[in-house]
Amino acid sequence: MYSFEQAITQLFQQLSLSIPDTIEPVIGVKVGEFACHITEHPVGQILMFTLPSLDNNNEKETLLSHNIFSQDILKPILSWDEVGGHPVLWNRQPLNSLDNNSLYTQLEMLVQGAERLQTSSLISPPRSFS
């Protein structure tokens, strides 16, 4: 079983990023235009989330259609925060089920979901990790 710190270290190595000296409880990674946040919540789960910028013309009902059931447990889910009513796209997986690629896949699926929410017709350049 991985600890949160081990999981973050592994992910940063896969992304060819320098590993922070101190791994904070919530750590951020910028992927293209998206700031992705990673934390252990609840205990034993790796939670990743981003705050996508959505077109004001998008109706919540239309956006929520992206939440259709899936066999893939890493598929992101769209929610709205209770305080500000802002959209939050998130996914999570158990720490004890991690393998060498699952964190990278989780992050990739989160970013792909955010891209789909923002636009389905825009072809974006390859994203870079930083």
Image (tube, rainbow, N blue to C red):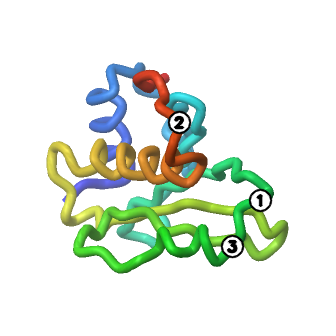
Nearer-N-terminus badge (2/3): 3
16 to 44, vertically: above or below: above
Inspect this view and state whether residue 120 appears.
yes
Q: Of helix, strand and loop, which one carries label 1?
A: loop
For disc 1, the neighbor class at 10 Å (few under 14, some 14 to 19, many from 20) is few
Specify the label residue 120 is tagged with: none
- In this figure, which residue is indicated by the disc labeled 1? 57
Residue at image coords 82%, 72%: 83
Cα distance between the residues tagged 1 and 2: 16 Å
Residue 102 locus on image (x, y percent): 23, 51
Which amino acid type is shown beneath numbered disc 1? Asn
Q: Quadrant of the N terminus?
A: bottom left
Q: Nearer the viewer, residue 10 or 116?
A: 116
Residue 93 locus on image (x, y percent): 33, 65
Residue at image coords 29%, 62%: 95
Say left or right for 50 vs 44. Answer: right
Q: Nearer the viewer, residue 122 or 22?
A: 122
For disc 3, the neighbor class at 10 Å (few under 14, some 14 to 19, many from 20) is few
Which amino acid type is shown beneath numbered disc 2? Leu
Cα distance between the residues tagged 2 and 3: 20 Å
Q: Of helix, strand and loop, which one carries label 2?
A: loop
- In this figure, which residue is indicated by the disc labeled 3? 60
Q: Of helix, strand and loop, which one carries label 3?
A: helix
Residue 112 locus on image (x, y percent): 42, 46
Give the farthest residue toward the left. Answer: 99
Residue at image coords 29%, 70%: 73
- In this figure, which residue is indicated by the disc labeled 2? 122
Nearer-N-terminus badge (1/2): 1
Q: Nearer the viewer, residue 24 or 45?
A: 45
Which amino acid type is shown beneath numbered disc 3? Lys
Tell us which disc is closer to us: 2 or 3. 2
Residue at image coords 49%, 28%: 124
